[in-house]
Amino acid sequence: MSSTIITLGDPLMQESDTQPSSKLSMAATPTANTLPQRLADFDTLTDALEYAAAGTTGYNFYDAKGGVRSVLSYSALKQSALMAARRLSSFGLARGDRVALIADTTPEFIELFFACRYAGLVPFAMPIPVNLGSHAIYVRQLRGMLESSQASIAIANLDFIGFLEEAAEGLNTDHLQWVGTPSQLELLPEIEVVFQPNSPEETAYLQFTSGSTRMPRGVVITEQALMCNLRGIVRNGLEVRAKDRCASWLPFYHDMGLVGLVLSPMAAQLSVDYLATRDFAIRPLQWLKLISRNRCTIAFSQPFGLKLCALRVRESDLKELDLSCWRAAGIGAEMIRPDILRNFADKFSAAGFDERAFLPCYGLAESTLAVSFSKINQGVMSIQVDTKTLVEKKMAVRVQAEGRKFNEFVNCGRPLPEHTVKIVDDNGEELPQMMVGSVLVRGDSIMTGYFNNHEETKKALKPGKWLDTGDIGFILEGDLYITGRRTDVIIVNGRNIRAQDIEELAEQQPEVRSREASAFGISGSDDTTIVVLVVECRLTSVEERQSLMSRLQQMVYMAFGVNCLVELVPPHTLPRTSSGKLSRFAARQGFLQRANIADQISVVQSGDR
């Protein structure tokens, strides 16, 4: 880059920035508060913190063994955020300049996020390197975010500062002025400044999309959009009560983790208990123990997190748990498979879990977070629709006869107040209920656009202020059902085949683990579409590998009537997004870059003739 990145000459502190801070209390914040509860009826995020800081609740951080690592009350957060804001002011940045924060599950990230808002700066969270592939891929992702956001400052703790410094080298921007750690920032002087109040029309933060189907883009969310969504979540979606308490393992760089389990609880003055995502992945039992021990009532997860719990938690561990307190088990962020929820409920009912606590919901970063919620205390409602009719006529018809192939979809509920959802066809015409089409959303939580990306903004925001979500689904009696992503539909000879259906078929084989298969389409030599299935494989025997490939090809043909090109790759090869989902877009790009593809395609095409 042509500009100079200023770094402090002082040596880095030797202890990790993630260690407990002596200035933080080590007694977890209480569930009961001293304040009358207000449910996100504030104009801005800092207004919400100003109110919450007068109470006794806050954020609590736990280690892998279940011990309290750090505690950050809302009162302490306000003070530390203001101090950090005064230090950020020493850089002389313009109002609205962007600040990049690598979002580990630490108090420092939250302090710096709010510090940016007090200082009139726009923070955005960047992922930690979990399931993102190689070192080079992670650094490239960070560099892309720094460039597209035109960040002026970038901050990471000691565990990740090396990645960030590497990403900052060779940047194609003159904007970046400083790269450092929270400890280095503390060495800067606090500038005496009177901060200008934030206005509802200002940008609150950028949220980078996960990039499962394309490169990540920075979603611009205003204070007004954020507060509207927070109100909808805590009032209508969760029906928050004064004695609620939250628990979360979700990463702070994901919209469900940040908006749903950091900002929403604060806006309702609730205490939250955090377990780092990597600790949850190693021992998911600790998350359930947090819920049980602290009597948490609200906890969200992606479906794969519940699947991990069902797989990893032993029957003998159930006697340590009492999950009867868990009244809102939010499920979202990816396609919701009813079988995963049933398996979880079957296992943990012995520990007091009530399946009526399941709370399926739908949302996306472009709508701040939430679009729709199912009803509290209703549990999972689903519908089984005929697969043939779904594929051929784009119509959701209930299965009438036994033995018919079906797809089961979960009811994601009704839109939040001030929001509307409609289903449209390829021409933009609204469809009647049970017809499958593109999901469009309109409401006060919708983004203003993608930062510095007019072309992508124009594609997403349609006339009439409708957001094209990129998802497909249908409406039944006012409730929304999501059937997949438009970009994840493979069209073969005029038939729409969901990539997820092919991947789930692959996972039925004992050699294929969950989230280790990626399906997509590529163009053949005669402009036909070839179905490709890439599977991570641990088998070393040539005979065993060939057997697996043959079985997979046969299963796909029997289910969908199309030939399939199967490629086996080593474990950890398939690229993943910052939220842990497989990136079909990146998997397809990687496949196309590998050698001898033309010969493989010709074999598949000859089988189609």
Image: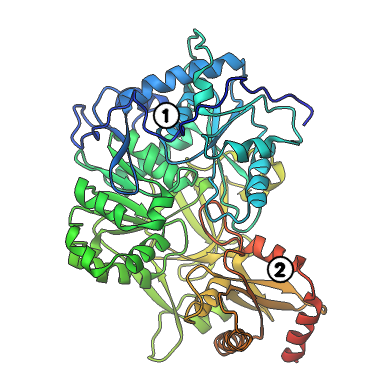
Please give the label number shown on residue 157: none
Question: Which quarter shows the N terminus?
Answer: top right
Which residue reaches farthest top?
A: 192
**Residues at circles 2 and 1 in contact by the CB criterion of under 8 Å:** no
Residue at the location (68% across, 66% down)?
A: 588
Secondary element at image label 2: helix
State the residue position of label 2: 591
Q: Name the side, left or right, on which 546 lies relative to 311.
A: right
Q: Name the side, left or right, on which 233 lies relative to 169.
A: left
Q: Position of residue 39 (x, y in %)?
A: 30, 35
Find residue 56 and report its image quarter: top left
Mark toward the start of the polypeptide (2 vs 1): 1
Q: Name the side, left or right, on which 591 lies relative to 472.
A: right
Q: Position of residue 348 (x, y in %)?
A: 24, 65
**Is residue 140 shown above or below 544?**
above
What is the total number of numbered labels drawn onto the structure image? 2
Residue at the location (60% across, 60% down)?
A: 583
Q: Name the side, left or right, on which 188 lies relative to 475.
A: right
**Is residue 344 shown above or below 157?**
below
Secondary element at image label 1: helix
Given residues 393 and 262, the one toward you in this image is 262
Q: Position of residue 219 (x, y in %)?
A: 58, 42
Residue type pointed to by label 1? Leu
Q: Position of residue 257 (x, y in %)?
A: 42, 46
Residue at the location (31% across, 71% down)?
A: 342
State the residue position of label 1: 45
Residue type pointed to by label 2? Phe
Neighbourhood count class around disc 1 (C-alpha, 10 Å): few under 14, some 14–19, many 20 upward: many
In this view, the mark in front (2 or 1): 2
Question: Which quarter shows the C terminus?
Answer: bottom right
Given residues 510 and 552, the one toward you in this image is 510
Find residue 375 and report its image quarter: bottom left
